[in-house]
Amino acid sequence: MDTITPDKLVKMIDHTLLAAQATSQDIKTLCDQAVKYNFGCVCLNPRWVKFALERLAGTGIKICSVAGFPLGANNTETKAAEAKSLIMAGADEVDMTADIAAIIENDEQYLRRDIGAVLKVCRSTRPPVCLKVIIESAALNDEQIIRICRIASDLGVDFVKSSTGFHPAGGAKVEHIRLMVQHAGRCGVKASGAIRTAEQALAMIEAGATRLGTSSSVGIIEQFKTMQHRQ
């Protein structure tokens, strides 16, 4: 693993706030923190994309929002329409939740159609919009994780993402990130869900994650700086 510096770490983080109760003041704080720490991206719910676009204008910080979130059980047409709406509102990246039942049942045809429809929307723009597919890895066995990673790679999505952070099975686990990296092919891997400390963040990067999704971004960076000062 390349040496991680604070400047590198902040650019790997999607500074995230997806809580249903998040207010405009909370989103303002999220955006202001992103500017202060120079995070690579903010990730927020669809209604806040335009708000964030105005708040972050000229900063170079990307905006990510979600489709089919958090259950992944919306029909394909709805997910595609959500993605289109997000992009029209100004989102640079879309994190869509895959249909978890289809992964468990090994319904590859449905998964390809579902993910492919959203991917088509993301690739219809210039420049194309980054698509990350959330697989809820904590709810899957190894075989299921491998299968969905290979499907995502074959379709050509940009990232597979471990978790929504809302599933009762839990969030990112190091062993799952490692498995995803091994089988994601051309896809990057985003670790997300229950990453709250610098030690956890670094463990995910060590396992091969190239993006991190967390609502504890500020604390992680401050902890990381303290760790460096002690060395």
Image (cartoon, rainbow, N blue to C red):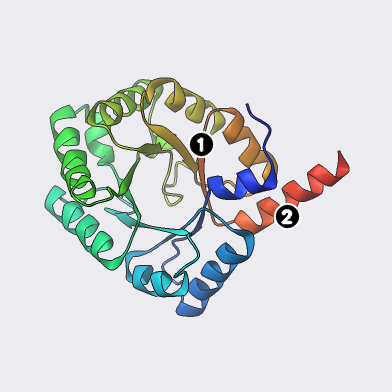
Q: Amino acid at mark 2?
A: Glu
Residue 151: quadrant of the picture: top left
Residue 162: quadrant of the picture: top left
The answer to whether residue 12 is above or below residue 103 is below
- Relative to residue 74, is residue 150 drawn left or right? right
Instruction: Characterize the local packing of mark 1: few (<14), some (14-19) or many (20 or more) Cα atoms within 10 angstroms.
Output: some
Task: Say if mark 1 contacts mark 2, CB within 8 Å.
Answer: no
Quadrant including the N terminus: top right
- What numbered label is drawn on residue 46? none
Label 1: which secondary element = loop
Q: Which residue is at a point 65% across and 48% down the rendered structure image?
A: 7
Q: Amino acid at mark 1?
A: Thr
Front residue of 170/218: it is 218
Q: Which residue is at a point 24% across and 51% down the rendered structure image?
A: 126
Q: Which residue is at a point 39% across and 74% down the rendered structure image?
A: 51
Q: Label 1 to label 2, Cα distance in Å?
A: 20 Å
Q: Position of residue 17 (x, y in %)?
A: 48, 62
Instruction: Check disc 2 and report the residue beneath it.
Output: 222
Instruction: Check disc 1 and report the residue beneath it.
Output: 210
Q: Which residue is at a point 64% across and 37% down the rendered structure image?
A: 202
Furthest toward the bottom, the residue is 25
Q: Position of residue 68 (x, y in %)?
A: 26, 53
Q: Position of residue 200 (x, y in %)?
A: 64, 40
- Relative to residue 7, is residue 95 drawn left or right? left
Number of marks in the rendered image = 2
Quick one: label 1 or label 2, which is nearer the N terminus?
A: 1
Q: Position of residue 228 (x, y in %)?
A: 80, 43
Front residue of 102/2: it is 2
